[in-house]
Image: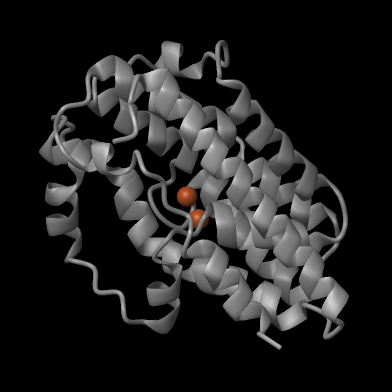
Amino acid sequence: MENLADRLLAIMDRKDHWAWPAFLRPGLARAELATHFRHEYHTYVRDFPIMLARVLGLGPPDDVRRTLAANVYEEQTGGLSFGVSHPDLFLEMMEGLGLDRVALSSPEGLVPEAVAYRAMLDRVSSRPPWIVGAAVLGIFVEGSVNERATLAGSRSEPPLEEAIALHPLVRHHGCPPAAMRLVRAHRMVEGGHRQDAWNAVLGHAPAARGAHDAIVAAMDEALALWLSYRDGVARAMGLVRQ
Ligand SMILES: [Fe+2]
Ligand SMILES: [Fe+2]
């Protein structure tokens, strides 16, 4: 029997979308970037701290309460980094790109797949068991396709200043490095969030096979809805699969 970590990592290996390379090279217009970032803001960036707080409200064990509370505190206040919430640091990055804060804040005209992805995030964060919400938010949403290497400690990241200079928004889209404090904050705290999320899920998943299956099923659903969400955004941006 495959263990739970392997099953979840196999899902994270697939958190990758065909349109992603377009975000790593020059060529996207401001309006296209705005479409992408407005969707990211409304699907999870703005309300991520609230979703985490809902999982805390579902009453996980004490060690998980503590790490979730610390995560909520940082995401909503930036109290462990710059004293600015992560959603606001995101908007700071948008201003660096020359995108309008008010236009980004409008939830009008999201593609239906984005609404479906968001509805799933609201559902898993609101309903027991807490461990499903913790997995989907802490591992799937906050994590990336690099999860396996990150967890194994084999992912080598360039030094922070170099990472910011090489960031596509700075390198190709003219965002001033000073507007990239979100990347700095994540370098300060996100390693902890990754480890906490895996500890919460792997440390508390009941040994019963059925519980593992429920977590894996929710993560599978998250992946399917995310891929469809990214398809919808690519369509709205006019990107075509090669
Ligand atoms: Fe964050
Ligand atoms: Fe985080």
Where residue 159 appears, as percent x and y from the top left, is: 17, 66
Please name whichever residue, 42 or 67, is drawn nearer the observer in this view of the structure.
Answer: 42
Q: How is the image coloured?
A: one colour
Where residue 226 appears, as percent x and y from the top left, is: 56, 43
Please report the residue visible at 18 percent of the width from the left and 32 percent of the height from the top.
Answer: 175
Please report the residue visible at 25 percent of the width from the left and 37 percent of the height from the top.
Answer: 22
Q: Is residue 131 visible?
A: no
181 is higher (above) or lower (below) than 87? below
- Looking at the rendered image, the quarter that the C terminus falls into is top left
Where residue 33 appears, as percent x and y from the top left, is: 31, 25
Please report the residue visible at 23 percent of the width from the left and 68 percent of the height from the top.
Answer: 157
Q: Locate residue 56 relative to residue 129 in the image: left or right.
A: left
Please name whichever residue, 137 or 112, is drawn nearer the observer in this view of the structure.
Answer: 112
Name the residue at the bottom extreme: 1
Please name whichever residue, 107 or 235, is drawn nearer the observer in this view of the structure.
Answer: 235
84 is higher (above) or lower (below) than 166? above
Q: Is residue 225 visible?
A: yes
Q: Locate residue 37 relative to residue 112 in the image: left or right.
A: left
Quarter of the image for residue 6 reads bottom right
Please report the residue visible at 55 percent of the width from the left and 12 percent of the height from the top.
Answer: 109
**Callout count:** 0
Where residue 1 appears, as percent x and y from the top left, is: 71, 88
